[in-house]
Image (tube, rainbow, N blue to C red):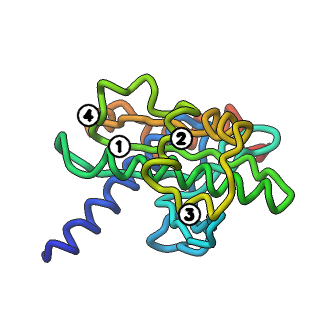
Amino acid sequence: MSAAESVQQKGIDGADLAKRWLESTTWIELPFDAYHNAPICTLRRLDGEKKVYDLFGWIHGSPKIPLYIESKGYDSVGGKQGKEFWEFLANAYSITAKDLKDGEDARREFWWITRMPFNSTDWSSLTTAERIKTALEDHHPAALGGEKINVDVLAKVAARVEVFVVNRRQEDFMLTPQELALVEGTLNRKGMK
């Protein structure tokens, strides 16, 4: 297996773990992935650039909340994860700001799922409005597409981004597909009854 194939396989495996873990909560359904459904997993920023997310689906509720997942399969400390997270924050802001500029708030949530913690000294502030502002000003100003930063949009995005660490060991505690089907039938979160 080549290095490029290895990296892609790691990405597929990370997205699969994130999908199975989140869906086992029964609150989330992620039927689309970037490997088979790239167009539906793709959003556009203020500057016209496209961003493809690893997974797309929704959080069950009334109404359903659109959910975009960026999954990282890092298995060691260090690397590019902290740098990539700045881009994740800038993208979440830019896509939300574009929605609002176009006249409708899609209410999208953006979640970062990783196997390895990162920036542990900043962990409590990773998803704050101030951190998103820094991502835009200092790391990815092009994501603004020439627009000024809007503090109301910063607050909105800060409430819609999350970071989760999912360790392989957690697989031992996830519901099996058969158990999940039984639980979903009883809870009826999907509104099938």
Q: Marks 1 and 4, Cα distance to the nearest angstrom?
A: 13 Å
Mark 4 nearby-residue class (10 Å; few <14, some 14–19, many ≥20): few
Position in image of residue 4 (x %, y %):
21, 74
Q: N-terminal of the two: label 1 or label 3?
A: 3
Q: Residue at x 23, y 66 (%)?
A: 7
Mark 3 nearby-residue class (10 Å; few <14, some 14–19, many ≥20): some
Q: Marks 1 and 3, Cα distance to the nearest angstrom?
A: 18 Å
What's the residue type where badge 3 is placed? Phe
Q: N-terminal of the two: label 1 or label 4?
A: 1
Q: N-terminal of the two: label 1 or label 2?
A: 1
At mark 1, the secondary structure is strand
At mark 2, the secondary structure is helix
Q: Marks 1 and 2, Cα distance to the nearest angstrom?
A: 19 Å
Q: N-terminal of the two: label 2 or label 4?
A: 2
Residue 94 picture quarter:
bottom right
Residue 130 lies left or right of residue 175; in this view the side is right
Vertical order, 191 against 145 (above or below): above
Q: Residue at x 86, y 58 (%)?
A: 103
What's the residue type where badge 1 is placed? Thr
Residue assigned mark 3: 32
Residue assigned mark 2: 132
Q: Marks 3 and 2, Cα distance to the nearest angstrom?
A: 27 Å
Q: Indicate which label's residue lies in the foreground, 2 or 4.
A: 2
Q: Marks 2 and 4, Cα distance to the nearest angstrom?
A: 31 Å
Position in image of residue 124 (x %, y %):
43, 22
Q: Marks 3 and 4, Cα distance to the nearest angstrom?
A: 25 Å
What's the residue type where badge 2 is placed? Ile
Task: Find out whether the residues at labels 1 and 2 contact each other: C-beta distance under 8 Å.
Answer: no
Mark 1 nearby-residue class (10 Å; few <14, some 14–19, many ≥20): many
Residue 89 lies left or right of residue 119; in this view the side is right
Residue assigned mark 4: 169
Residue assigned mark 1: 114
